[in-house]
Amino acid sequence: MDGQVNNLQGRVRESSDELEALRRELAETKREAMTDKLIGLANRRCFDESLLQLTTEARDSREPLSIALCDVDHFKNFNDTHGHQVGDQVLRLVGRILF
C-alpha cells in the first residue's frame, strides 16, 4: 500500500512540475506575442489589450482615463534614408525615453 501511495505522490509531483513548466511557457509565449521582436517594445496587440482593460476599469470605477499618443514625424523618410537598422535603433531610443 505504501508503494502505491508513494507512486501516486510521485506522479502528482511530476504532474504539478509539468503544469508549472507549461504555465511558465505560456507566460513567455504571451510576453513574446505582446512584444515587437525588432525593437523589444510593446506592440499593437499589447496596446489594444491594455486599452480595452483600462477603459473597462475606468468605466466600472467611473474614474477618468487619459491617453497620450505620439508619432515620430517623417519616420518613413528617415528609415528610407538611413536604413531599417538605424531606424530600429531610433525606435528603441525613443521607447526608452518615453517609458
Image: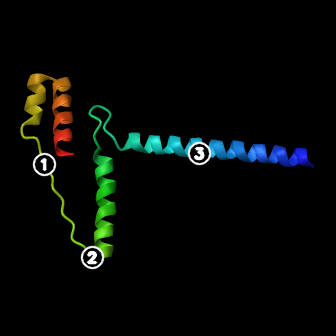
Who's the residue at 43% across and 45% down the image? 30
Give the mark nearest the N terminus, 3 or 1. Answer: 3
Q: Quadrant of residue 58?
A: bottom left
Amino acid type at image mark 3: Glu
Give the mark nearest the N terminus, 1 or 2. Answer: 2
- State left or right for residue 45 relative to residue 30: left
Q: Are marks 3 and 1 in contact (CB under 8 Å)?
A: no
The relative height of residue 88 versus residue 66 in the rendered view (above or below) is above
Amino acid type at image mark 1: Cys
- State left or right for residue 14 relative to residue 32: right
Who's the residue at 11% across and 33% down the image? 76
Mark linked to residue 22: none
Nearest the viewer among 1 and 55 is 1
- Crowding at dot 2, Cα within 10 Å, few <14 / some 14-19 / many 20+, comes out as few
- Give percent across and percent down for residue 40: 30, 36
- State left or right for residue 19 relative to residue 87: right
Label 3 SS: helix
- State left or right for residue 93 relative to residue 25: left
For disc 1, the marked residue is 70
Label 1 and label 2: CA atoms lie apart by: 26 Å
Marks counted in the figure total 3
For disc 3, the marked residue is 20
Amino acid type at image mark 2: Arg
Label 3 and label 1: CA atoms lie apart by: 39 Å
Closer to the eye: label 2 or 3: 3
Mark linked to residue 62: 2
Who's the residue at 15% across and 23% down the image? 83
Give the mark nearest the N terminus, 2 or 3. Answer: 3
